[in-house]
Image (cartoon, rainbow, N blue to C red):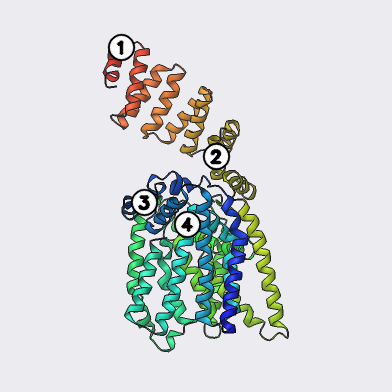
Amino acid sequence: MRPQLVLRLAICVALVAITWAVFGQTLGHDFVNYDDNKYVYENANVAQGFTVSGMRWAFAHFDNDNWHPLTSISHMVDCQFFGVKPGGHHFTNVLLHTIAVVLLFLVLNQMTNALWRSAFMAALFAIHPLHVESVAWVAERKDVLSAVFFMLTLGAYTRYARQPSIARYLIVAIIFACGLMSKAMLVTLPIVLLFLDYWPLNRLERSSAVRLIAEKIPLLVLSALSSALTLLAQQKWEIRLDELSLSWRIANAASACVVYIWQMLWPVHLAVIYAHQEKLPLWQTIGALVLLLSISVSVFLLRRSRPYLATGWGWYLIMLLPVIGLIKVGALAHADRYTYLPQIGLYLAVTWGIVDLTRSWRRGREVLAVAAAAVIILFAGYSWVQTSFWRNSETLWRRTLATTKHNDLAHFELAEFLSKHRRFEEAVMEYETGLSIDPQNSDAETNLANLLLERGRTEEAVMHYERVVRLEPASALAHYNFAVGLHRIGRLPAAIAHYEEALKLEPGYPDADYFLGQALLQNGQPDEARLHLEKH
């Protein structure tokens, strides 16, 4: 066996080892109550395992505001083999991440012929603390699955670029389509391929820019179709520009890009949810825009002498575009998982840049080797600790609250976990703390009211139900819940009025109809009561 092949194999084994050293612990972790239920154990279409009807559902329906049929099918396959035991689902996440890591190394080495730089970049991708969320969270299966198809697309494209043919192009398109069916964030991959054409594939030396752009049109059509389906799936998250101004979107996007760069270098105080900022400080926005513009201008000026900077920086910005809020804002505008694939571009620019800067050092290679090993060991250790916080819902949310301020969503999620585990007084405290931060959250108000009602604290429950009615006056459920509370404390006329309002908003509401009859009967209105009770 050739020495180079043995060395590449040894590097692959080392990459597998460090990946499992960090993330192997997740095989003993539970599911968490943040989307794992929606994607797996409370999703009837998924939990039944791999079936024909499940396959049809995966392609024909939107799953949790996304169209990613291959991701849904992968969860079904897990349920087929492991049931709803979390260990098996975590195993698949780590396995897919490991495959993506090894593929990244092989593809980078294939493109650049820079063995050790490719190995270092793959190691960073394997164990960077920002990537813990994508691997340790079962619901983020779409990240690790799409990453495998992303790397395969890069590898197939490299083969095509060196010896173009229709068959090779079709392979690229098919793999790319699979990636889009895993996670729509890959929509900007055709633009990344253009940057790779510039460097390291150097295709501009033998093809015109117009031809290379035209070559990507079929891939861009696939991206457009995926984008349309995603926008359709996420309609409920769409926010009109008059509600979130363009200036806010630009400020948030610039700030997020800079924060992610900082977190790449100093990945501390990470959290699954960051508190939302209604208004960003002006200095922060201006500083972020100036920094991004300065880097972009510098990269442009160095495009010929340092072409890897253009590719790395372009990769980073283009891949972040779908998730930084310029085009669309979903539930979150900033999350660690958004950096999973985009940050590879920064790894590339920084790794090649440092090697260039130290090329003239007397012992540059030895210094870089020691520094690289130190970085990997440090990040691996921190990632291992960060992964341990994903052990279960309580450890996750308590860590989130310890690392963020004014995080109402984290309080609400912790409250939900505590309530489910019948730790009611703790749950009430978390709901109340969260509502003190965001008093407009009607779901949390409702959950707190339900909990108080169950605990016999009816007067307090009624107070919260009333707040929900004020927040959602057009909700039949809000009026029904308020009516139930009023009914229990004997305020019959008010209860009757809200039962009637619930029926007005949702004619035929069975529970509201029945309990309205009961309230009318208790209020001395037997004839009116009979009209409602006879239906049941």
Q: Position of residue 344 (x, y in %)?
A: 53, 69
Q: Residue furthest top?
A: 524
Q: Position of residue 42 (x, y in %)?
A: 44, 43
**x 34%, y 82%: residue:** 165
Q: Is residue 45 visible?
A: yes
The numbered disc on residue 526 is 1
At label 1, the amino acid type is: Pro
- Between the C-alphas of marks 1 and 3, the distance is 46 Å
Q: Residues within 10 Å of mark 4 (few under 14, many from 20)?
A: many
Element type where label 2 sits in the image: helix
- Between the C-alphas of marks 4 and 1, the distance is 57 Å
**x 61%, y 73%: residue:** 120
Residue underneath mark 4? 141
Question: Earlier along the polypeptide chain: callout 2 or callout 1?
Answer: 2
Question: Earlier along the polypeptide chain: callout 1 or callout 3?
Answer: 3
Question: Earlier along the polypeptide chain: callout 4 or callout 1?
Answer: 4
Q: Position of residue 431 (x, y in %)?
A: 55, 36
The numbered disc on residue 235 is 3
Element type where label 4 sits in the image: helix
Question: Earlier along the polypeptide chain: callout 3 or callout 4?
Answer: 4
- Between the C-alphas of marks 2 and 1, the distance is 43 Å
The numbered disc on residue 248 is none
The numbered disc on residue 417 is 2
Quarter of the image for the N terminus: give it.
Answer: bottom right
Question: Residue 267 occupies which quadrant of the picture?
Answer: bottom right
At label 4, the amino acid type is: Arg
At label 2, the amino acid type is: Phe
Q: Which of the two discs, 2 and 1, sits closer to the camera?
A: 2
